Amino acid sequence: MKITDAKVIVCSPGRNFVTLKLTTEDGAYGLGDATLNGRELAVATYLTEHVVPLLIGRDARRIEDIWQYLYKGAYWRRGPVTMAAISAVDTALWDIKAKTLGVPLYQLLGGASRDSVLVYGHASGADIEEAVKAVAHYVDLGYKAIRAQSGVPGLASTYGVGRGGMYYEPAEKNIPPENLWSSERYLDFVPQLFSRLRREFGPDLHLLHDAHHRLTPIEAARLGKELEPYHLFWLEDPSPAELQERFRLIRQHTTTPIAVGEVFNSVYDCQQLIQEQLIDYIRTTVVHAGGISHLRKIASLAEMYQVRTGSHGATDLSPACMAAALHFDLSVHNFGIQEYMRHAPETDRVFPHSYTFDQGHMYPGDSPGLGVDIDESLAAKFPYQRAYLPVNRKLDGTVHDW
Ligand code: GCO
Ligand code: MG
């Protein structure tokens, strides 16, 4: 079953997406997400110039062989651009294989390990009162797990506070905005937010929070410790994780569960975090960590150390990635939770899909393959628009992690 066509589709229905569509000689096709927020065209070019010429004529059934060919064969390994490109190829090949066999993808991954996929949504507000209202809204929608973020008094902007509506989109058109940050103000404020949310919503609701890589290990340890009475489901990215041993200090001080990994691209980025049990949830996802094939290897390593999965699922991961994540989540034994930020209506129109949400859980559906398509003529009506994630500075002007 030879690959005869490989098309890289760049579109911007609500935000930018890069999608790979592979077609075989018998007309079957598969989709893979290759979106890297703020660096979309780097992956599109990597695919068109360096990967597509290698795919034409190759046997679409040899998924693992093609993965290794693209990974080892490039000599230059890993990194977000390369791995997003490999992910797209891998996802599209799994989609083709499942479609050809007439089964939903999770059936090829060992079948369902559970009936549904627990997801968390994003509630945010400019202040505590607004955040409480936003959480209540998500509860009304049926969510059982909610990530809560709020504006911090004395800071004009902070990570995770949406511009209204049901999704949080941090990328901005043209030149990146600059945000101002103070860890001191943030650390003083966040425990007040969660104390209020627990009082308001009782013990059963799962509450999550994302610190977005901004704290030093000792600051993160303090935050984890102060949040202990409020029993978070997890505290995400408390500290940048390039240096994995940083997390030992956090771990020594707090029982608040820790989730890390949305910016990781391979098992090597999280090997120490997993093997030393420095985290509770690994957040690598299909599009940025080498596709379904590589994500399964990460999950297998994590399973040995009782670390569960909690894949990234922000709006900048396309419906093709969301669907792939749901098939993975349904099948993998050590699944924990899945992030689900809804897409803009125009994104959903460009990518019709069979996955559904009900009462805080999601279902990939039983269409063959991923259960996602792309309306190419509609996609063409939404051309690429350059956009960047914000850059962060401390109050004294020093560049800080965003
Ligand atoms: C999350 C993430 C996102 C990222 C975004 C970057 O937990 O969902 O932190 O909000 O900032 O995906 O592109
Ligand atoms: Mg995050």
Image: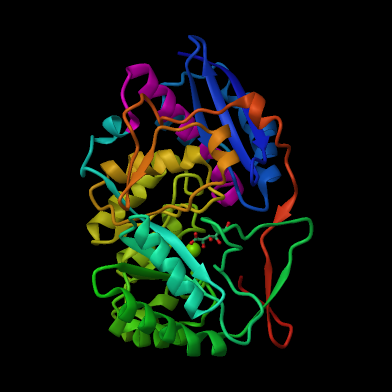
- For the C terminus, the image quarter is bottom right
In depth, the one of 53 and 292 nearer the eye is: 292
Q: Quadrant of residue 270?
A: bottom left
Residue 83 picture location, percent across and down: 54, 45
Q: How is the image coloured?
A: rainbow
Q: How many numbered marks have been drawn onto this rendered protein structure?
A: 0
Q: Is residue 85 magenta?
A: yes
**Magenta residues, start to end:** 76-105
Quadrant where the N terminus is found in the figure:
top left
Image location (x, y in percent) of residue 149: 49, 72
Q: Is residue 158 left or right of residue 335?
A: right
User: Measuring 25% from the left and 55% from the top, which residue is drawn there?
Assistant: 303
Is residue 72 in sight in this rendering? no
Residue at (24, 69) in percent of width and height: 204
Compare residues 76 and 86 and report the one nearer the observer.
86
Tell me which corner region of the image, top left, top right, bottom left or bottom right, holds residue 181: bottom right
**120 to the left or right of 47:** left
Main SS, magenta residues: helix
Give the percent coordinates (x, y) of residue 12: 67, 41
